């Protein structure tokens, strides 16, 4: 996963190897 326009979000995503885990985390963050 490449670093995009949201460094903070990238840092969060970096904690996950499973794409579905990233999606679940993103849903919590943006909900």
Image: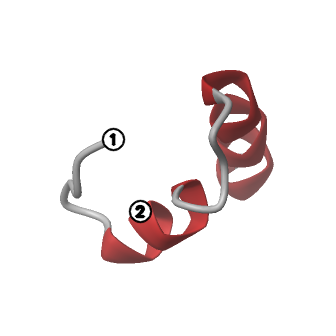
Mark 2, residue position: 10
Q: Nearer the viewer, residue 3 or 29?
A: 3
Q: Where is residue 25 in the image (x, y as percent from the top left)?
A: 74, 47
Location of residue 15 with respect to 24 vertically, above or below = below
**Disc 2 on helix, strand or loop?**
helix
Q: Quadrant of residue 1?
A: top left
Instruction: Residue 9: give its label.
Output: none
Between circles 1 and 2, the one closer to the viewer is 1
Q: Residue at position x 65%, y 61% from top?
A: 15
**Disc 1 on helix, strand or loop?**
loop
Mark 1, residue position: 1
Q: Position of residue 2 (x, y in %)?
A: 23, 47
The residues tagged by marks 1 and 2 sit, at their Cα atoms, a distance apart of 8 Å
- Position of 15 compared to 6: left or right? right
Location of residue 4 with respect to 27 vertically, above or below = below
- Position of 6 compared to 26: left or right? left
Q: Nearer the viewer, residue 23 or 28?
A: 23
Furthest residue toward top: 20
């Amino acid at each position: 996963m490449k670093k995009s326009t949201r460094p903070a979000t990238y840092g969060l995503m970096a904690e996950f190897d499973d794409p579905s885990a990233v999606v679940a985390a993103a849903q919590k963050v943006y909900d």
